[in-house]
Image (cartoon, rainbow, N blue to C red):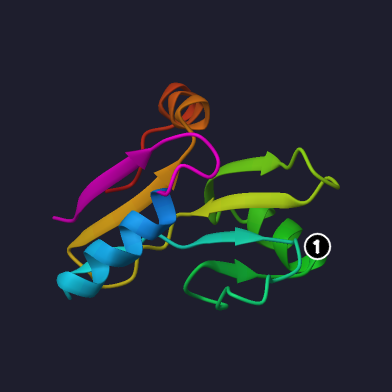
Amino acid sequence: MAKAIIICGSTGSGKTSLCKYVCSKHESIQIFCKSTTRPRRKEEYDGIDYNFIDVDSFNSMNISNAFVHVKVGDYNNYLYGINGNRGQSPIFILTLRLFLFILVLLCRELPV
């Protein structure tokens, strides 16, 4: 059975940097990849930092229940989804702002 490590913190607190460091030291740990419709930033990698997809693909995934949580972003109304597909790794890291983590727990149990 897979295990989850959830890193909570405010925006810009270093959650992603911590996750990348842990993953670089432990090959069995994988970052739980989220999807978004926002443009990729130059320092980000598709499929690692986020799955960067278009709105139609996002909506199709949402209709088919591919996400365990969906959020309309605070900036330019970009869409964000936490993917339910975890891949093959036995241990996953998911980064969330604390408020979002509480909402996910109240709405749906994470599939780990």
Label 1: element kind: helix
The quadrant where residue 52 appears: bottom right
Q: Nearer the viewer, residue 21 or 88?
A: 21
Q: Residue at left 26%, top 48%?
A: 112
Q: Residue at left 62%, top 43%?
A: 70
Where residue 44 sits in the image (x, y, percent)?
57, 73
Crowding at dot 1, Cα within 10 Å, few <14 / some 14-19 / many 20+, comes out as some
The quadrant where residue 16 appears: bottom left
Q: Nearer the viewer, residue 70 or 42?
A: 42
Query: Position of 44 compared to 23: left or right?
Result: right
Residue highlighted by disc 1: 55
Residue 94 located within the stretch drawn in magenta: no
- In the image, residue 40 above or below residue 36: below
Which kind of residue does numbered mark 1 sit on? Val
Where residue 61 sits in the image (x, y, percent)?
64, 60
Query: Position of 58 compared to 87: left or right?
Result: right
Residue positioned most to the right: 76
Residue 10 located within the stretch drawn in magenta: yes
Per the rendered image, the range of residues in magenta is: 1-14
Where residue 100 sits in the image (x, y, percent)?
52, 31
Circle count: 1
Quadrant housing the N terminus: bottom left
Q: Residue at left 81%, top 65%?
A: 56
Query: Position of 106 compared to 65: left or right?
Result: left
Query: Position of 112 compared to 100: left or right?
Result: left
Where residue 86 sits in the image (x, y, percent)?
35, 63
Q: Nearer the viewer, residue 57 or 40?
A: 40
The quadrant where residue 6 appears: top left
